Amino acid sequence: MKLCLRMELFVVSALYAMSLVGMGGTGGGTVYVGNGKIVGVGAGNLRYRGTYIEQGGRIKGTVNLYAPTGGTLVTGAQVPADSRWSLTLDWPANFSDGKPQAPIVEGRQVHIVMEKSTISNASRFYPDGRRALD
């Protein structure tokens, strides 16, 4: 009998802290990534909402960004109030490994480091130690 072990990376549904660095400065935010959805908010009131699929050890999807109050992005670009645009993601499934991801935002590169919240791990268990459902 032949035993075959298949290892596959997958996205852990969790709350993630984002650290962003661009030519115009730094920023941060918090996003939930899980169950095919991405939802969050940035320090400058930037809103994130999107979807993704997992394919071949990667997450591929689109994130819609909305700047209700406008402002300056970490790229240095000025955006007016009610600005909207989209980003295409093609990141490794282990995107929170400490290595920066580098999407293009409004024509300029941004470096994003994602850190999984430890609260996400703690919330998976009841106080008596039983595992909670995802």
Image (cartoon, helix red, strand yellow):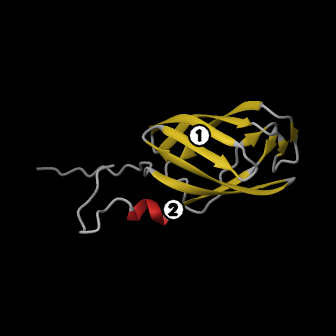
Rendered location of residue 97, percent (x, y): 54, 61
**Most foreground residue, 118 or 11:** 118
**Most foreground residue, 28 or 96:** 28
Image quadrant assignment for residue 81: top right
Residue type highlighted by circle 2: Ser
Q: Residue drawn 23% across and 63% down?
A: 130
Q: Secondary structure at mark 2?
A: loop
What's the mark number on residue 117? 2
Residue type highlighted by circle 1: Asp
Residue 3 left/right relative to 20: left
Q: Secondary structure at mark 1?
A: strand
Residue 46 left/right relative to 89: right
Q: Residue drawn 51% across and 62% down?
A: 117
Q: Residue drawn 51% across and 46% down?
A: 33
Image quadrant assignment for residue 114: bottom right
Q: Classify 10 Å Cα crowding around label 1: few (below 14), some (14-19), many (20 and above).
A: some
Rendered location of residue 18, percent (x, y): 64, 56
Q: Residue drawn 49% across and 48% down?
A: 93
Q: Classify 10 Å Cα crowding around label 2: few (below 14), some (14-19), many (20 and above).
A: some
Residue 106, placed above or below residue 116: above
* Distance Cα–Cα, label 2 vs label 1: 22 Å
What's the mark number on residue 90? 1
Residue 106, placed above or below residue 93: above
What's the mark number on residue 56? none
Total numbered labels: 2
Rendered location of residue 48, percent (x, y): 63, 40
Earlier-in-chain disc, 2 versus 1: 1
* Front of the two marks 2 and 1: 2
